[in-house]
Image (tube, grey):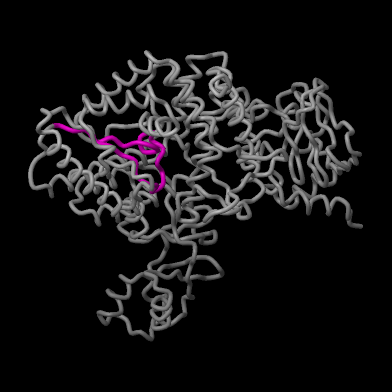
């Protein structure tokens, strides 16, 4: 007789992470061990400092609040499908919060003894638990637990740039078109034409025994050696040279060169005794080689037209998609894509300079600002840039600035042509406000620092995240030093900068619901950039500047440096570093999926796992903003 209760439990759990990563039979087996618990409103599930139970919990119906013992402030609310009470079991420690039924609630109690073996053997479950521990933790990105599960240590250095460049897995076609040994050649040719393919597998008893390619049709049929009425067996290449799936780019190239063939047949175990799973062609390898960052970099440097650069940037986006699919660490991905973005910008500048009527009258520097300046521009987002040019006599200033404004306009147009949108706020070198001599820039930045109104705070925030993409680095270095000298002489600026960092709206409401846009073009969408990313980015900027560190612009790296400088806040800073990369990765995935900047998220398009991971970062945002408010006494500024 079927256990209908356990079946209902399994049907419910399969919709939520991490249970959605389990095989059906595993989930059915686990469901047999689940206990159903009913809790009236305000009854305790577990108390703070209580020893961990032998099971953790999933909310089936109702809601559970998490709070500090004796406090009326609710820190979190778990609703349908949420997991809680797991972290203490994994960390072997007491509960850090009190869990209480917020309303009448039904819970599923999952025995850890039955769940643990499944999690250890299932990588997806392990990754979910590592990335988003159960709700009763103040810091889901705790360095204490990050990268390990049940004492298992992960290899954070499993990827190197060499692996990315040469040993990346290669995509192959899994849409196999086949025929039998007795199929007529004319039928084979018609089939290949219909499906627009360059080869066809010859099968016997569902196993591959030969292959026919375009080359075989040209050499053996078109030349008259065999009539079109002959069979596939007469012209097929056999025995087959087969390989296992999961070949790397380097292995695929070596295999084709070794056997002088243009197609590789991939089988389940690499032999012809198992079913074919795919075919890899020379074209597939050419596409993969074209998406190699070293090849893309060489192509960028050879490009002499904007349209050519635009085509290359399609390859960069394909490269980015591949890296995300391979789950390569985002820090490494960001460095590679940033290098390619900088190279693309530099080549646009060179092309623009070649079209100017005269050489630049004085040395200049092109600054990339915003996400590109921080090394975080993975998608084709809008431009933020500026020009610094060397000082000239007063009578030459207007003519010199006009030259660089013209250059800035041509560069911005070129960047737009290759895929970077114009800045909606016009923070570009084609705007006189963002194209100055070194002395003028010093005056402008000093004004921002000593007169920190809302506009000045916004402008300085943009400007502090810059990177020298082209030209005389010494101009930028001198300006940086002047900025830091001015800031040190006016420490109140940090309070204003911190205040600006706290102006972004909260990501969630009281009941953990996402706060979405109330009107306008993006009504009912969640603003990922403004509500979550910018608070973390802004906090990193003001904190690193307060330590007079001017050589680190990347948000994650800023937090990692802060963790070194302030060991007492190490846990929070590393949590922020992790969260910044997780959010950037999330935004990039959304942007690639919807072919946009990934800023505005349609919540109804997210699954439960995505929503949970996104919500985990909200706590980190609140904690880092609380630190800013206390350290820089922002409330005193508002009085």
Q: 232 or 23, which is in the foreground?
A: 23
* Percent position of residue 223, x then y: 25, 79
Q: Nearer the viewer, residue 298 or 590?
A: 590
**What number of labels is visible?**
0
Q: Is residue 94 above or below residue 22?
A: above
Q: Is residue 1 left or right of residue 527?
A: right
Q: Quadrant of the C terminus?
A: top right
Question: Start and end of the magenta stretch?
Answer: 363-387
Residue at the extreme front: 639
The answer to whether 604 is drawn above or below residue 451 in the figure is: below
Q: Of 439 and 252, which appears nearest the observer?
A: 439
Residue plotted at (67% across, 48% down): 608
Query: Along the horizontal axis of the image, is 10 left or right of 281?
Result: right
Q: Is residue 365 magenta?
A: yes
Q: Quadrant of the N terminus?
A: bottom right
Q: Which residue does the image show at 72% across and 51% down from the upper left?
A: 15
Q: Quadrant of residue 365?
A: top left
Residue 498 screen position, x and y as percent: 50, 25
Q: Is residue 42 left or right of residue 424?
A: right
Q: At which x and y percent is residue 65?
A: 79, 35
- At 40% from the left and 47% from the top, the residue drawn is 381
Name the residue furthest bottom: 229
Q: Is residue 594 above or below residue 47?
A: below
The relative height of residue 7 versus residue 237 in the rendered view (above or below) is above
* Residue at position x 33%, y 60% in the image: 261
Say if the magenta span includes residue 136: no
Percent of width and height locating residue 415: 28, 49
Q: Nearer the viewer, residue 400 or 267?
A: 400
């Amino acid at each position: 007789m079927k256990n209908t209760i356990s079946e209902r439990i399994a049907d419910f759990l399969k919709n939520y992470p991490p249970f959605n990563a389990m095989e059906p039979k595993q989930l059915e087996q686990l469901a047999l061990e689940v206990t159903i618990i009913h809790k009236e409103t305000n009854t305790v599930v577990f108390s703070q400092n209580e020893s961990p139970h032998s099971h953790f919990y999933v909310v089936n119906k109702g809601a559970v609040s998490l709070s500090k013992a004796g406090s009326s402030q609710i820190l979190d609310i778990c609703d349908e499908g949420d997991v809680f009470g797991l972290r203490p079991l994994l960390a072997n420690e007491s509960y850090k919060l009190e869990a209480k039924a917020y309303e009448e609630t039904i819970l599923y109690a999952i025995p850890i003894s039955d769940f643990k073996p499944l999690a250890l053997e299932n990588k997806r479950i392990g990754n979910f638990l590592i990335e988003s521990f159960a709700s009763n933790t103040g810091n889901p990105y705790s360095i204490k637990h990050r990268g390990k599960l049940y004492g298992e240590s992960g290899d954070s250095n499993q990827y190197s740039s060499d692996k990315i460049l040469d040993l990346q897995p290669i995509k192959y076609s899994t849409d196999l078109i086949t025929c039998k040994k007795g199929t007529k050649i004319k039928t084979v040719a018609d089939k290949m034409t219909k499906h627009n393919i360059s080869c066809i597998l010859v099968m016997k008893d569902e196993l591959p025994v030969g292959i026919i390619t375009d080359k075989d049709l040209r050499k053996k049929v078109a030349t008259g050696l065999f009539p079109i009425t002959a069979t596939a067996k007469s012209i097929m290449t056999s025995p087959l040279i087969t390989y296992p799936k999961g070949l790397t780019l380097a292995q695929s190239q070596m295999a084709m060169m070794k056997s002088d063939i243009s197609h590789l047949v991939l089988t389940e175990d690499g032999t012809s005794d198992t079913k074919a799973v795919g075919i890899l062609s020379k074209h597939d390898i050419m596409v993969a080689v074209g998406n190699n960052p070293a090849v893309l970099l060489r192509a960028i440097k050879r490009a002499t037209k904007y349209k050519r650069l635009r085509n290359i940037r399609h390859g960069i986006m394909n490269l980015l998609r591949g890296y995300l699919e391979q789950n390569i660490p985002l820090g490494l991905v960001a460095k590679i894509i940033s290098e390619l973005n900088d190279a693309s910008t530099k080549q646009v500048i060179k092309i623009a300079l070649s079209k100017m009527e005269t050489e630049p009258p004085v040395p200049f520097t092109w600054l990339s600002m915003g996400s590109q300046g921080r090394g975080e521009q993975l998608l084709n987002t809008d431009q933020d840039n500026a020009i610094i040019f060397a000082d000239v006599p007063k009578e030459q200033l207007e003519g010199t600035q006009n030259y660089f404004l013209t250059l800035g306009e041509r560069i911005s147009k070129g960047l737009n042509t290759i895929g970077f949108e114009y800045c909606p706020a016009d923070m570009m070198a084609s705007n006189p406000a963002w194209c100055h001599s070194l002395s003028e820039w010093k005056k402008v930045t000093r004004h921002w620092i000593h007169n920190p109104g809302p506009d000045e705070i916004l402008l300085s925030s943009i400007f502090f995240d810059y990177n020298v993409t082209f030209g005389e680095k010494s101009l930028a270095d001198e300006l940086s030093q002047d900025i830091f000298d001015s800031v040190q002489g006016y420490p109140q600026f940090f309070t204003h900068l911190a205040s600006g960092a706290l102006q972004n709206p909260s990501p969630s409401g009281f009941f953990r619901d996402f706060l979405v846009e109330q009107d306008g073009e993006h009504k009912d969408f969640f603003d990922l950039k403004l509500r979550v990313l910018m608070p973390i980015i802004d906090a990193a900027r003001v904190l690193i500047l307060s330590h007079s560190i001017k050589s680190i612009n990347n948000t994650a790296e800023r937090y990692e440096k802060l963790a070194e400088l302030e060991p007492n806040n190490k846990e929070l800073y590393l949590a922020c570093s992790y969260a910044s990369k997780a959010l950037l990765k999330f935004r990039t995935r959304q942007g690639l999926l919807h072919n946009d900047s990934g800023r505005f998220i349609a919540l109804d398009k997210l699954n439960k796992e995505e929503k949970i991971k996104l919500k985990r970062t909200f706590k980190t945002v609140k904690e880092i903003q609380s630190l800013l408010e206390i350290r820089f006494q922002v409330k005193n500024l508002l009085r």
